Structures are given as structure tokens and as C-alpha cells.
Image (spheres, rainbow, N blue to C red):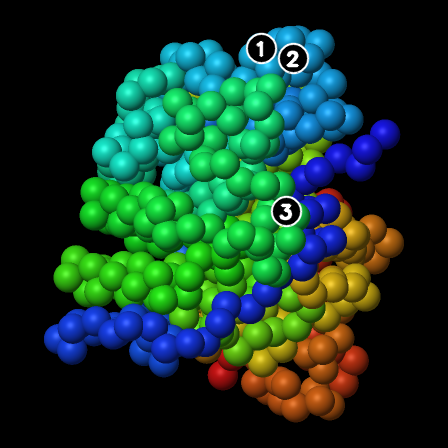
Amino acid sequence: MTQQITRRTFLKTTGAAAAGLAAPRALRTQQAFAASWDSLTRHTPPAWFDDAKFGIYFHWGPYSVPAFDNEWYSRNMYIEGERANTYHKLVYGPPSKFGYKDFIPMFRAEKFNPDEWAELLRKAGAKFAGPVTEHADGFSMWDSKVNKWNAAAMGPCRDVVGEMSRALRNQGLRFISTFHHQWLWGWYPTIDKSVDASNPEYSGLYGPPVPQSPFRDYDKPTPPPPPAFQETWEAKVREVIDKYHPSLIYFDSRLNIIDERRLADVISYYYNQGERWHEEVSVTYKEKDLPRGAGILDIERGRLDQLADYKWLTDDAIDWNSWCHVQNANYKTAHRILGEMIDIVSKNGSFLLDITPTAEGVFPQPVVERLLAIGEWLSVNGEAIYGTRPWKIFGEGPTQVKSGMFGEEHIPDFGAEDIRFTSRWKTLYAIALDLPSNTPHLLIKSLNTRDALLAKGEIANVSLLGSDAKLSWEHSDAGLKISLLPAMTPGLAYVFRILLN
């Protein structure tokens, strides 16, 4: 069988290229940021982002209707040999008779309640959130004048972006938008006359006629996207900026196919708009799509193995295999998600979790259960996450984490010897990612009195977050030895608050 095409296999086989460094055109001098990398790399990540640590977004669109395979269904349904193609022909008929556009009337979102969604995300502990504003499929999830193929005009006939922006802000969350629409260039078989994607009537959804080579040749697309495609790409971003004022814009990979002068123009426009709104804003980017410092580096489905001296982000999905709702989903456990978040925060990162609503507009019960479990843990232990900063070291333990994108599935669950640190003023937080089952003590070896991380007498007190019980502890050459409470059970993460003199 043909190897299934996903963004993971595509990016692994093709890699990513650095954006060029030719000088973009400048903006007016009175603006805070010029459209140059020299100016944009002076931008600093928002303080609110550094404090928030945890955000949530969701993939939701016409691709949620078939709920099969993954969010690449819109592309793979047209490719002979792909699982989505086989499934599509069996359930809906050949793509020549039933194209992706035909899912739009079926995407009705009849149970969509933005206030309930926003309340759930707040209960989950998220501090920033938002929808996938437009995926690679070309369908805009906002009330757009740029793209007639949008959720306010057809399908659900709802301004999903607008409704979610209001609901999330009413719950006290920062609103974010995510853009993936540079992937539209070559996403569909627009030169295949046997399918609807080649019909000029639908080019607003499927994009202009493009040979398949630009999609596969990531580094040097031939031909590159023409100005008309790039102008539409830019107009969509600007429309969302002006209409919804997002606090963060997430850019998916493949920004390198957009002219760098246009990229710099868009980003500087957004940063200057943030100045006008008196709002700290930023963008995220993948790998080498932007120069370091022009935004926040995002590591998709992966992490860093060491503490970084810059702010970074991981975005990962609640499902091991898909970013959108699918049948027979393979959800991660709440404990696994929390371990990932804690590890990221200890290394100066933030965590953006993707969740998966159904086409009707509800979250599957396993998703709700995991979100509430995460929120319950954060309600007790959030002091060790929100508003914290990295400590001298990120932690200790034998579990190896490899840096880079798409490595999450190869990282084992943390064990009883894995500890992560965060800090706040004179407080050090030691987060035990599991507990030993064969001893009533926890030994944090890196906090020994020999290695000068914490000198003898520097610890004033040790307590357990969420408990008033007094802990017995001993600080020695061997480390910090803490006596565990009888109620503490393996399989959960516990936070020890260490007050320093």
C-alpha cells in the first residue's frame, strides 16, 4: 500500500528551508516596527505569554465531517492508494462525483455553543485559546470578505472565529488565531480535469491550477506561488488581525513559500497594530521559517532536551495520530499530557494543546474528561506552572527527551526518578512526575549540598501543594530526601514547594 501522506511524513522527507534575508521594504518611521528582520528580531515575546504557559486550540472544519484518518483528508481523498481515498470511494463515492466542497453543507455545527466551549477551556486551565482560523483546505472559519468560502456564508453559517473570540475573552482567556493556508498552494489536484478541484468556479476554495511539484518540492517550489496567491494569503491574515485583534498568531510551517518581504510586511503590520491596541502580541513559526527572534519558535509534536535561554512553544494534539476528530481516536492520557506540559515549562517553553470537536460541535467525552483532569491538577498545582520561570537546571532523571519536531511518540512516559523544576522569587518547585512504589521517600539527587545548586542551610521549608500536612525532609550530600505522605500514590505528578532562605 502507498505510504500514507501526513504532514509528519511530508515534512520529514522534505525538510524545511530558511527564509531569505534580503532587505524588505521599510514602513513609516513613526511605527514601532519596520518591515525588516533587523527591526522584527528586536521584538520580545509578550509577558502574558511567558506567564500563561498553557493554551488550547482546535482543528474544526469540513474535514471533521468524514472524521476519518486525519486532518489531511481534504487532500488525501483525491490521491489514489491513500486510506482516505479508499474510504471516500466506499462511503461517499469517487472524488470525481463527490468532492471536498460537498462536505461543506454537511458541516452544520448544529450543537456548537461557543460559551460552553470557552467555559470548558477555562476549566481545563488554559490561559489562551482559539480556533484553527484556516487550515490547508481553503475554508475560512470567519466572516470573510476576502474568501467567499467561509463558515459564516455556508456550512454552519456561523462566524466561528468571531464567536469564539468573544466567548474566550468573556472567560478571561487571551484569544489566538492559527493560520495554515500557505499549504493551499498545491494542496489539491487542481490540474486533474476529472475532479472538481480543477473547476475555476471553485478556485476560491481549491486554489489556482498548480502542478503537484510545488507541494512536494518544499525547498524550491517550481513554480513559486504567484503574486495573486500571495496577495490573497496576506489579505486573509490582515482581515483577521483587523477584525478580531488576536493576541497571538500561530503560523504553520511552509512560510518559506511566501515572499519574505511580504512576510515582514504582515508581521510588522501585526506588531504595530498591537502597539495601537496597547496589547502585547506575537507570532509563532516553525523551524527556520523566520529568523530567530522575529517570533516565537514552535516545535510541533516535539520538545527540547535542554533548558533554553529563549521562549519557545510546543503544539501537540490530544490524539496520538490526528489533529481533528476521527473515528476510533487514540487519545493520550491526562497524566501523559501533564508530563509533557511540565517538561516543556521547566525548559522555558509553553504548551499549546490541540483538541478535537466533532462536526456537530461537541467534544467527545474522553476529551472532556482529560481536559477536566488537567484543569483539576492545575487548580491545585498551577502555582508551579503559571507565572514561573526556569530554575538553574530544568530537572533530573533517566528518561531521555530528544530535541526536534515529531519526536513526541518516541519519548517514553516519565518515571519515579524524573523531577522537573520551576521557580518564583525565593521559591523552588520540584515536580515529581511520578512516585516510587517501593519506598516511602523521594530523593531529589540534584539538590545535594555538594554541587552548589543549593548550599547547606539554604532550604527553609518543604511542603506539598494541595496539602496542609507537615513533611519531614533532610538536606544532605545525597540530595533532598522527602518523606512521602500515605495518601500520595504512584501514577500522579506531585509538586513540592521549597522555600529558600
Please state the horizontal and vertical placement of residue 246, each as a whole percent of the image. Answer: 29, 49
Task: Locate residue 430, reporting x and y percent.
Answer: 61, 66
**Amino acid type at mark 2:** Pro
At x 73% / y 90%, what residue is drawn?
450
Label 1: how many Cα within 10 Å (few below 14, some 14–19, many 20+): few
Check disc 1 and report the residue beneath it. Answer: 97
Secondary structure at badge 3 equals helix
Quadrant of residue 39 in the image?
bottom left
Q: What element carries label 2?
A: loop
Give the vertical position of 296 relative to 41 (above or below): above
For the point 42% across and 76% down, the residue is 22
Which residue is drawn at the image coordinates 49% and 14% (left, top)?
Answer: 102
Q: In this view, does 476 lie to the left or right of 277?
A: right
Q: Quadrant of residue 86?
A: top right
Q: Quadrant of the N terminus?
A: top right
Relative placement, left or right, of 80 versus 130 is right
Q: Which of marks 2 and 3 is nearer the N terminus?
A: 2
Mark 2 or 3, which is nearer the eye? 3
Mark on residue 94?
A: 2
Q: Please determine whether, in this image, residue 383 is positioned above or below residue 147.
A: below
Label count reads 3
Q: Residues within 10 Å of mark 2 (few under 14, many from 20)?
A: some
What amino acid does circle 3 point to? Answer: Ser
Q: Which residue is drawn at 64% across and 9% down?
A: 93
How far apart are the two marked residues, 2 and 1, measured between alpha carbons? 6 Å
Amino acid type, residue under disc 1 in the picture: Lys
